[in-house]
Amino acid sequence: MPPPARPLEPRSARASRLNTVNASTALLTDRYELTMLQATLRDGTAQRRSVFELFARRLPEGRRYGVVAGVGRLLDALAEFRFGQVELDWLREAGVVDEDTIQWLADYRFSGTIWGYPDGELYFPQSPVLIVEGTFAESVILETVFLSILNHDSAIASAATRMITAAGNRPCIEMGSRRTHEGSAVAAARSAYIAGFAATSNLEAGRTYGIPTTGTSAHSFTLLHDTERDAFEAQVRALGPGTTLLVDTYDIPEAIRTAVEVAGPELGGVRLDSGDLVALAGEVRRQLDDLGATSTRITVTSDLDEYAIAALAAAPVDGYGVGTALVTGSGAPTSGFVYKLVSREGTGGEMVPVAKKSKDKVSVGGRKSALRRRDAAGTAQAEVIGIDLTPVHDGDDRTLLVELVRDGSRVHHETLDDARERLRTSLAELPATSRQLQAGEPAIDTVYEERT
Amino acid sequence: MPPPARPLEPRSARASRLNTVNASTALLTDRYELTMLQATLRDGTAQRRSVFELFARRLPEGRRYGVVAGVGRLLDALAEFRFGQVELDWLREAGVVDEDTIQWLADYRFSGTIWGYPDGELYFPQSPVLIVEGTFAESVILETVFLSILNHDSAIASAATRMITAAGNRPCIEMGSRRTHEGSAVAAARSAYIAGFAATSNLEAGRTYGIPTTGTSAHSFTLLHDTERDAFEAQVRALGPGTTLLVDTYDIPEAIRTAVEVAGPELGGVRLDSGDLVALAGEVRRQLDDLGATSTRITVTSDLDEYAIAALAAAPVDGYGVGTALVTGSGAPTSGFVYKLVSREGTGGEMVPVAKKSKDKVSVGGRKSALRRRDAAGTAQAEVIGIDLTPVHDGDDRTLLVELVRDGSRVHHETLDDARERLRTSLAELPATSRQLQAGEPAIDTVYEERT
C-alpha cells in the first residue's frame, strides 16, 4: 500500500462541507421540536432556563467502553443551524408552525453554553457526554441534529477502537465508504481516524478533514486488461514499484510471480481479498521471500472485523483494510444516546431538577459534573457523576467535561490528532483486561455523588 | 397523532439538496478509482467499452427478498458528479493523480447508458440491479457513490417493508433521524416512504422529497411545565384538541384522565413510549373508552422493530412510530451490493465477458438481462437472468430493467408514489408465505439463461 497521500499535519477545525447545499442544518430536525417550541412560545415557558443532557443508558451488549466522536462536527453543525429564507418559506408553506414561531426562528442564534466530553474521550453508562444550558426554546430544537451526529460518529469510533486494539502495531485503513450512506462515509472516516486508523480510501474525507488517503486497485482493473501481467505493468508504470498489487483475481501464486517479475523485489505490497487469509498470508510471505521480495508488504481485506483481525495476529500480515464492519459499527450501528431535560427554571426563578418516571426509562434529574477516578498508578477506577455538585477531585482524578460553547460562541477548537492522542491516553488508563475484545460489563462502574 | 403536514401529492423528482456545499459528489469516491483511471489513461485501456454490474451475492441472513431504493438519489448524484475547481485543486495539492488525469477529470461527463431495477422493485441474489455501460474510465469512477447510495437506501427500504407488512393496515411513522447520521436520516425517510410509511418526523425529508411530516411531543415538554396538566393545556392550546399527547412521563392512568379533561373526548391521540405495550394498550383503550374518548387514537413507539409490531397486532393500537430499528436496517444495515466489471472490449473491438475467480467471490461474466417469471395467476416463480441474451418472455412474465440514462442523459423520472405503488405490486406477486417475517431462503430462485 503506498504511503498516505500527504504527511500527517496538524488538522484545523474546518467547517464540514457535507451539509445541505444552502449550508443550513436547521431542518435536520424532528417536527415535534418546532411544534413544542410553538406551544411554549404561547404559554411563556419557552424562556425558562433549562439544562439538557445527552447520555447513553447503557453500552451496546458486551462492550466495555464507548468512544466519543462527532463533537467537532456537532460544533460545525451548530454554527450552520440557521433558519434562512429557504427554510422559513418551506415551514410556512408546509404549515409546520405559526407565523410567530417562524419569526422567532428567523432570529435564531443559540446563546447558551455547552459542555461536553471531547472527541476521543471514553464514555460509560450515564456519562453526561453533552450538557446544553440555555432557554428551553433555544436548546430543545437542537435535539435531533446533536443526537444524529453523536449517535453515528461515536458508534463508528467505538467499533474502530476495538479494531485498532486488535491490530496492535499494524496499520488499519478505512475503506468502508461504499457500504454506507455517502455522507456517513465521510463522517465514518473521521471517526476511524480519531480511533487510530492510518488512512482512508475516501477522497472527500481527505479534502474535508485532511485525513491521509490511500488505495490499491480493484479486480475490474485486472479484468479490463488482456492479461494480469498487462494490468500489473500498467499499474507499476503509472504508480511506481512501491504500489500495492491485487493478486487474487485468478491464481495467487502465479500472480505473485508475475508481480515480482514486473515490479522487481522492491514491489511495495500485495493485497489479498479472499480465501483463508491466515493460511494464505503465510504462503504468500514464503513465496515473496523466496523471490527476494522480503520487504514487500501483505495487506489483507475481505470483510474484516475486530475478531478476524485478532485471528490474524500470528499471520505475517502487514496491514488491514476494513470496510463493512467498521462503517456499520460492527454490530452496534448506533450509540443509544438520548437528549433529556434534567433541570429547568421554576416559577420562582430557581432551578428545579426534573426526571421522567417512564417504566425502564427513568432519567436522573439535576445538572451533572463528571470525573474519572484514577488510582495513584493512573488506572481508572470509576466514572464519578456529581448531581448538582462537582465531585471532589483527589489529585489522581481527571475532569471530563470541557467547555465547548460559552454564551453562544464556540470556544473549543481541536485537531483530529488531539482527539487521537486523547483516546490513546484514555484507553491506556483502563484496566488492561477491559481493553480486550471479550464481551463483558463496562470497564469501570458509574457512581453518583449528590448532596445529602 | 395529527394528520400529515400536507396532503399526499405527486412527488416531483427533485434534486437532492443533501450534498456537499459546492454540490459536487465527485469526491465521494475511493482514491483507487482515480489511480486506476490514471494507469488506464497511460496504457490506453481507459477507452475500452465496459459493462459494470451492481448486484448482491446474497440477501441478508434469513431475508426472503430485498427492496431497491436510492435509484432517484443515484441519478441526482450522477448529475452532480463534476470535478470543479475545488475538487481539481485539492486532487492536485494532495498529489492523488497526475496532471493528465486531472485534465481528463475536468472535462468529465458520463456519456454512457445505465439500466436498472427502479425504486420499489424487489431484488434477489444476483439480480442485476444496475448495469452501467460506457468506457472503463467513465464507469469505474462511479463505483463508490453508486454503491454508497444503493447499499444504504435499499437496506432501509428492505427493513421498512417488513415493518409495513407486519403493521397490516395500521400506519407507520418514520422517526429514526436521531439514531443515524444526519444525512442518512433524510435518505432513510425517503426509503421508508417508498416502503409505505405514512410520514416522517424529519423536516428536511419533508422539504427535499415532499414526504408528509408529523410528530407529537417529548418528555422534556412535560417536564418543562410545573404540572402535566399545564403541559397538556399548552399543547392543546397551540395545536388543537386533535393533537397527540405523550402520557407516560409520570403515571399513565392519571395522565389519560388529565388529557381527556383538557382536550375533551375529541382528543386526537395519545402516545405510549415505554413499558409492556401489549398490556398497556388494552388498559389505555379501556380507560379512554370509559371516558368517552372512543375515537382517540393510540400510537406506540419505544424501540419497535418488525417483530414487536407483529406482536402488537392483537392489541388496540392505531399506529406505530419506528426509529432505531428502521434506520439501522433492523440487523442488516447494508445491502451487500458490489460493483463488478462483467464485460469489456477486447483487442479486436469485440466484447469479452470477464469474471474473477477469487475463492468464494466468483462473479458471473457477461451483460445481463432480467425478468420475473410469473405463472398465469401472476405469482412470481423465478428471477430469470439472461447472460448476453434476453430471456424469452412468455406473456405472464415481467421485464425488470428500465433505462435510466441513455448516452449520458437521464431518461428516468418518477415520483416516490410511483415507487410505492411498484413495491405494493411486486410484493403482491410473491408467494404469500414469503411475505411473512419468518427467516427463510429467498422467496424465489435465481435462474440463469445463457447461450449453449
Image (cartoon, coloured by chain):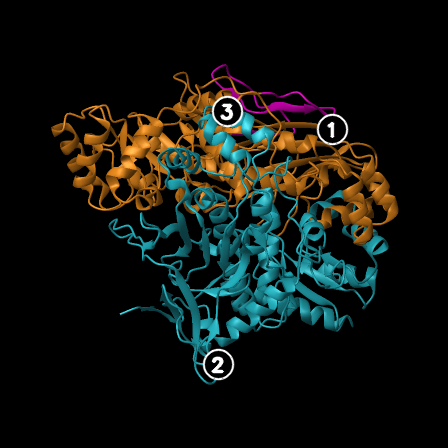
Chain colours: A cyan, B orange
Looking at numbered disc 2 in the image, what kind of residue is underneath it? Gly
The residue indicated by pointer 2 is A378
Looking at numbered disc 1 in the image, what kind of residue is underneath it? Gly
Tell me the quarter of the image containing the N terminus of chain A.
Answer: bottom right
Q: Which numbered marker is on residue A106?
A: none
Q: Quadrant of residue A127?
A: bottom left
Determine crowd level at label 2: few under 14, some 14-19, many 20+ residues with C-alpha closer than 10 A: some
Looking at numbered disc 3 in the image, what kind of residue is underneath it? Arg
The residue indicated by pointer 3 is A92
Magenta-drawn segment:
B384-413
Real-space Cα distance between discs 3 and 2? 56 Å
Discs 3 and 1 lie in a common subunit:
no
- Chain to which mark 2 belongs: A
SS state under label 2: loop
Determine crowd level at label 1: few under 14, some 14-19, many 20+ residues with C-alpha closer than 10 A: some
SS state under label 3: helix
Q: Quadrant of residue A412?
A: bottom right
- At x 83% / y 51%, what residue is drawn? A234
Q: Nearer the viewer, mark 2 or mark 1?
A: 2
- From the viewer's perspective, is residue A354 above or below residue A100? below
- Chain to which mark 1 belongs: B
Residue A167 lies left or right of residue B373; in this view the side is right
Real-space Cα distance between discs 3 and 1? 42 Å
Residue A384 lies left or right of residue B366; in this view the side is left
- At x 19% / y 45%, what residue is drawn? B251
Spot the residue most to the front: A348
